Image: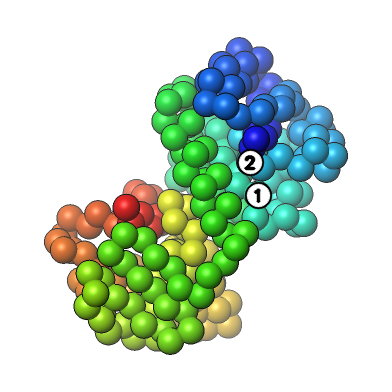
Amino acid sequence: MKSILIVDDEVDIATSIQYYLKQEGYATLLAHDGLEAMQIIENQHPDLIILDVMMPGIDGYEVCRRVRSNDKRTPIVMLTARTSEVDTVVGLELGANDYVAKPVRLRELVARVKVHLRDATEQKTPSRVIKYGDLQIDLDSRLVKVRGEVVELTFKEFELLATMARQPNRVFTRDQLFSQVWGSNFLGESRTVDVHIRYLREKLEEDPSRPKHILTVRGVGYRFVWE
């Protein structure tokens, strides 16, 4: 049974989330501040963390930073009443996988939890061939096929696609993608990512003007979805 840690100083919100997750068959752990959360994480190693941003003492950003200093894999879903682009980007840059705005839509949150747990399970047994429906990405041969047809990608286009495809449904900021694909020493800017995303859409999407797979998260970056 997968275990989920819910960290929120608002008891009513935490218990409501707990109820919905238990209905879906998950084991749940509760913490109402950052210190308590860190103790549970270190001792019980939950499979996923739902983490409120604004808490007294150690806030959600700091908890996320501490977790990611040792653990790169456990999914973290941030809850935030802050809706500005800057606040969202901060959480993602610290290593959060996703964010959900308050007031929380519980069914949507549960759906996202399921997706991230599924993706985390798949990543524990990495394959050199990534498959999603009619898309196939061979990491060794650097060959991409859609519906059995080979799609020719440049080196950077392939790296960009592979980076997102390894963690589907994760929201990547432009800076994260730029750093991972081009490297911190590359002389350029994160808007280079936008250009290459456009190229990928032209090659992979049936209608590049209305993409279904390489999605823009307004004010933040991009999310890869292929179902």
Q: Is residue 118 left or right of residue 138?
A: right
Q: Position of residue 186 (x, y in %)?
A: 52, 83
Dot 2 amino acid type: Leu
How far is mark 2 from mark 1, CA to CA?
6 Å
Where disc 2 sits, the SS reads: strand
Q: Which residue is mark 1?
A: 74
Please provide percent x and percent y for residue 99. 50, 40
Occupied quadrant, residue 202: bottom left
Q: Quadrant of the N terminus?
A: top right
Q: Which callout, 2 or 1, points at the residue further toward the start of the chain?
A: 2
Image quarter for residue 212? bottom left
Q: Callout 1: helix, strand or loop?
A: loop
From where the camera sits, is residue 90 visible?
A: no
Who's the residue at 36% across and 82% down the image? 143
**Residue 93, placed above or below residue 135:** above
In the rendered image, residue 224, in percent from the top left (x then y), is placed at 38, 58
Q: Which residue shows up at 33% across the image and 78% down it?
A: 144
Work out whether 41 lies above or below 170. above
Q: Residues within 10 Å of mark 1 (few under 14, many from 20)?
A: some
Residue contact between numbered discs 2 and 1, judged by CB atoms under 8 Å: yes
Q: Looking at the image, is 6 positioned above or below residue 208? A: above
Left or right position of 76 against 63: left
Q: Residue at x 57, y 38 (%)?
A: 78
Q: Which residue is painted at 14% across and 61% down in the image?
A: 207
Using residue 162 as the reference point, say whether residue 51 is left or right of it: right
Residue 48: assigned label: 2
In the displayed structure, would residue 88 be above or below residue 168? above
Give the residue type at disc 1. Thr
Residue 42, horizontal then vertical, whole percent: 83, 43
